[in-house]
Amino acid sequence: MFSQTSQLLQIQAANNNSHPRYGVDINNKLFFVSGKTYQQSFWKSDGTSVGTTVIAAASGTGPSPQFNNIKTIFPFGTKALLIAAPTAASFDQELWVSDGTSAGTFRLADIYPGSSGSNISNIKVVTFGGVTKALFSAYSPTDGQELWITDGTIAGTQLLKNINSSSASSNPFGFEQLGTNVLFFANDGTNGIELWKTDGTTAGTVLLKDIYSGITNSVDQGISKIIALGTYAFLNVKDGTNGVNFALYRTDGTTAGTQTLGPSYPNPANLTAFNNKLFFTNNYGSYTNLLYVDDGTGFPIFVNYYTGGTNVLNAEQLTPTANRLYLISKWLNGEARLYCIESYAPSLARDTRDINTGTADPFPIDASKRKLTPTDNDKVYFFANDGTSGTELWISGGDYVSTNRVTDAVSGSNGGDYSYLKTVGSRLFFVVNNASNQYDCYQTNDGATPTLVKNYTPALNISNLYPIAKVGSYLYFSAYNATSGYELYRTDGTTNSLVKDIETSVFNTNNSNFHPTINATNSQGLFFISNDGKNGLELWKTNGKQTGTSLFFEFNKYPTPEGLSAPNTSYDYYTTSTVFVNMYAYNDKIYIVTSDGVWVTDGINPPTKLITNYKLTNAATNFFNVMGGLVYFTVVNELWKTDGTVAGTTRIGVVDPLYEGDYNSIVGLELVNNKLYFLGYHYTYGQELFVSDGATISLVKDAQTGNNSASDLNKIRRVGNNLYYVLYNNSTGFELYKSDGTSVNTTLLKTFGFDSYAPSYLSNFNDTHLVFSGGDLTTGEELWKSDGTAVGTVMVKDIFPGNDSSSPINNTNRGQFSFYNGNVLFTANKGSGRGLFKSDLTAAGTDSVTSISTFDALATNTGVYFTTSFPSTGNEPYKVETDGASVRNVGDVIAGSSNSNPINMVASNGLIYMKTYDASFREFIHVFKMCKNEEVLSGTITSNSTTEAIDAVKTSAIVNSSITQNLLAKKYIQLNPGFRTSTNTIFSAKIGGCVYSTTTP
């Protein structure tokens, strides 16, 4: 084989990622989750490589984390309670226990026998008689969602009480220890959701008091809360005496000792324990007041502003530290400030600082960003906008001097986008962007100027840091390294260290890498999607050279959104992959459809978002076409048009205006006589043929009267000035129709029925015939054609005689057959294995080109490219032009008989790209030049040119004066009679044709 360098890109050079996440400090060790979706495991680490080990049961399989739940690990003394299943692919999530050893890791109970999980929730560690136990809620088909208890042993894990008898559920929640009892809320089916208590025994699990008499609930699950203080507990519930208002109750654990504090404190909320006192707000309708009550029989005391003596208004975000209680108070004029209550002066709230002068509320509206983050040295970090620098990170020690902005991450008024906040002592770790919208992980110590964590130990060469959890004085985090991928690290605030490279196997495969249909070409090169292991599945660009191949644009950048229970796609957890739907090229622009919007780029500048549409999150298909110089595209059931600008992008309409939110997608978008045709679903007509003139959408004909069903097998294709389409009839099965765009000329060609092969691979043959795959139980699935008449809709040839199927397919050409030299190309099985076939739509002209087994047939102007296996080369890329004798090996990617198993062939700018694999199933992109086997030149050559062929170049042409012509071929160059050069002609003929290198300029 001639020498060439075909490797363009190793898709992921790093090892597999372990993606450590969801960590919990248990006995000064990190228990955490690691692994890909459906390949996750529990791990523990003491901060050393040898001490970082997988948690596995001694017998059987498991535990495997519940992949869709971020709270799967719970401290239980020196052990961990785990919500897990026996295998990663199982939904049989139950409660497990682990001390980090195999012998100490096992399932506690199969509460819901079989393959279903028991919905473990509301785990609370408590003590009964000095023994550590855990209460939790779990579901079984016999008892419903009920109260369970465990001491960490199989024998000690049992249903504590079936509070709501039979299979109904009591749904216990809100557990709070009060002395030797635990208080909680539950519904026994008779008294509604009320206050219960348990001493850890079935007999001692009783209704404490029916506060709202009768079946009516006294408890609102989103509002009611139990707070224990010493020998009393407080709760906010409804008792029916004040209408719908909540009341503040106090209990000593007895029925008689469970009493309201009276109607003077309506709608208590924000219940917070601080310094052995309960702080709460009551609500008078237009404002709230802040109060506190001691552990005892006293009554609440109002908290006043430190100066002025008035009651603290509209307090929220009550956040205790060891000696201080911080809160936000919003005045009646809308101004909000941060206040601090010292433990020694519980009735006085001190104003820290007027952050944003005037009457503004400087704190974020987003509830998750409005929270205060306490530290171990009695301070809080928070976000605020001072009116100049946008919403940024601040710190406060409870007074004016100690309340300051920590950083202006994004200079100007925009503010930073902060996430992944973790405190270690007085230090705060966080991820934020800068003015260039680049995100990084930083640390601030007690409010000092933040520093980049990745720079503490440069030799590690890490990026994309994700804080996981504090263990002792260390922060554990995940980070990416170009060799090891995303792995587990830790830092003490000055030095970083790799804890363990957990996943050392090589990256193998991701079916979406170099997707065969989601790609497009313009003058800048080929645009495709790929996951490099760091950035996730994103948009790449190549000009066919290694130096010209790179990530073009990240739609979803680091960091992945915090709090996701699972990856936002089916790809690796931290790689923030984008969900791509389609790509389309027109007028040297590339249009990209993602689950977030429709974008456009010239291939030089970053993509511009044309529209955002919520329906795209459920879009599986999307179609484009051009009419009148405008690009038309579909978004589920909507039709849009654009001139490539935001202002020039408008929606034409929806198939059924009465069902705007319908998710039945438009199928196809075919242009005939300056109108666009497609299949759409209407709730009156069912799935039918619709038309648009670019301004409106209308029905062509209700061909199948009534509301016929939509089907994923229904397709449409233009042939000449006619449209062929497939519909599913609820009475007769699949049917093939033809239309010229008018109702009168829309006719049924053939009914294929239910027990048949629905027409597929609808393809346009020379603008004269529809060619497709279809059939019935008599002939099997074979090659069919239609000339637009019922009598002319027939099987071309029974390739696999009898009722067996030859199953004509093509995996390479976007759901259509390929065409070359007046023939349709496809792969089929004539009984001796699958091979490459061609047909001129006659039975006699339908036969195998070669018996080579293949599923691909990509037609180009230089031949048909496919993959197959020969003993001498293994499974490699080949091409064919006429028959078996014209088959040529395009390239032996892995020399010798080993297989590179190329797939996803794409032709672009004279090159053919494909994805290949090595022996370890690592993915690569290889590229070759496309050439004919033989080129024949004649006439006069009037411009500079280079002609290449795999076998030979034959020429009888005259090369004009001052012209440069280069001829290259692998075997020979033949100068035939008539060939001649002219004055100042530069002519060269060399052996070595169709050689391409990705490494040369």
Image (cartoon, helix red, strand yellow):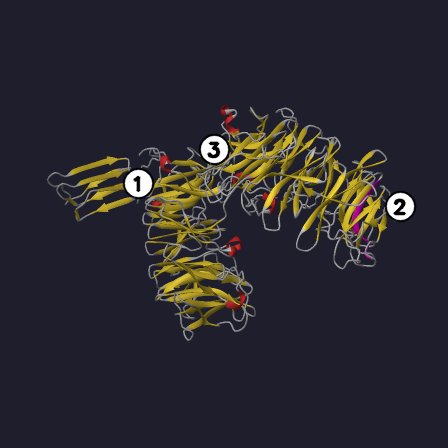
- Say which mark, if any, is on residue 950: 1
Placement of the C terminus among the 4 image quadrants: top left
Q: Which residue is mark 2?
A: 203
Is 294 on the left-hand or right-hand side of 599?
A: right
Look at the image and say whether residue 306 sits in the magenta stretch: no
- Disc 2 is placed on an element classified as loop
The mark lying in front, picked from 3 and 1, is 3
User: In the figure, 460 relative to 190: above or below?
Assistant: above
| Among the two numbered marks 3 and 1 on one chain, the one whose residue lies closer to the N terminus | 3
Instruction: Please state the total of marks drawn on the protein image.
Output: 3
Provide the major secondary structure of the magenta segment: strand
Q: Amino acid at mark 1?
A: Ile
718 or 504: which is nearer to us? Answer: 504
The x, y position of residue 921, in whole percent, is 50, 36
- Give the x, y percent position of residue 281: 71, 47
Question: What is the quadrant of the N terminus in the image?
Answer: top left
- In the image, 651 versus 80, the foreground residue is 651
In this view, the residue farthest toward the front is: 308
In this view of the protein, which residue sits in the foreground, 363 or 908?
Answer: 363
Compared across the picture, whether 553 is left or right of 226 comes to left
**C-alpha gap between disc 3 and disc 1:** 32 Å
Q: Amino acid at mark 3?
A: Ala
Whole-number angstrom distance, CA of label 1 to CA of label 2: 89 Å
Question: Is 1001 positioned to the left or the right of 650 in the image?
Answer: left
Crowding near the residue tagged with mark 1, few <14, some 14–19, many ≥20 C-alpha atoms within 10 Å: many
Identify the secondary structure beneath mark 1. loop
Q: Which mark is residue 13?
A: 3
Highlighted range, magenta: 181-189
